[in-house]
Image: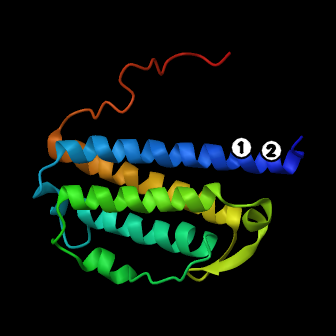
Amino acid sequence: MKDKVSQLAEEFIVQSIYRMDESTRMIHICMEQLSEEEIWTRHNESSNSIGNQILHLCGNITQYAIAALGQKADSRERNKEFETRSGYSKSQLVRMLEDTVEKAKRAINGSTVENLMRKRNVQGFYFSGMGIVIHVVEHYSYHVGQIAQWTKMLKNRDLGFYDGIDLNVKNK
């Protein structure tokens, strides 16, 4: 029988991967509604396009989950994520994000309790493996919220993330 710490680590991993899959699902819903031009739209020079947000997510998830947690080389070029103004289609961006998230999920899923507890430097911060996973999940969710907001502004419609689910059900 697994010990309590291993069970907790396993549940933490399962729930983290579930949240990442939910964020990916929401990105798909947004991207399906946007034109090629709209994904690179910036409302002003202080704003990033949805394309930039996707590139940024790929860079951040790679640096944290794949490189730091998965113990691979860190080759991120963060500034390029925001300087890019075109050059990727919707389908290319979605594929890049899907590939990145799948690699990250493998690194997370393959983590031992020791790897989740070990601290290391990432992007100038000092995190345990659990801290890295929490960062990846919340950072992904944060930018999904921005992408959803941009999509709603551009399309003036509800995105239907939870269509068919009664969100007014009370906890029992």
Whole-percent x and y of residue 104? 52, 61
According to the image, what is the colour scheme of the structure?
A: rainbow
User: Where is 133 relative to 151, above or below?
Assistant: below
Give the residue displayed 43% in from the left and 47% down from the top: 23
According to the image, label 2 marks what residue? 7
Please identify the quarter of the rendering in which residue 119 is found. Answer: bottom right
The CA span between labels 1 and 2 is 6 Å
The residue carrying pointer 2 sits among few (fewer than 14), some (14 to 19) or many (20 or more) residues within 10 Å by Cα, namely few
Q: Position of residue 47 (x, y in %)?
A: 26, 67
* The C terminus, quarter of image: top right
* Figure quadrant of residue 57: bottom left
Placement of 110 over or under 77, stated as above or below: above
Please name the amino acid that badge 1 sits on. Answer: Glu
Q: Are marks 1 and 2 in contact (CB under 8 Å)?
A: yes
Residue under numbered circle 1: 11
Q: Residue at (45%, 57%) from the top-left corner?
A: 101
Q: Is residue 49 visible?
A: no
Q: Is residue 37 left or right of residue 27?
A: left
Which structural element holds mark 1? helix
Q: Position of residue 160 (x, y in %)?
A: 31, 30
Considering depth in this image, is 98 or 33 the residue closer to the camera? 98
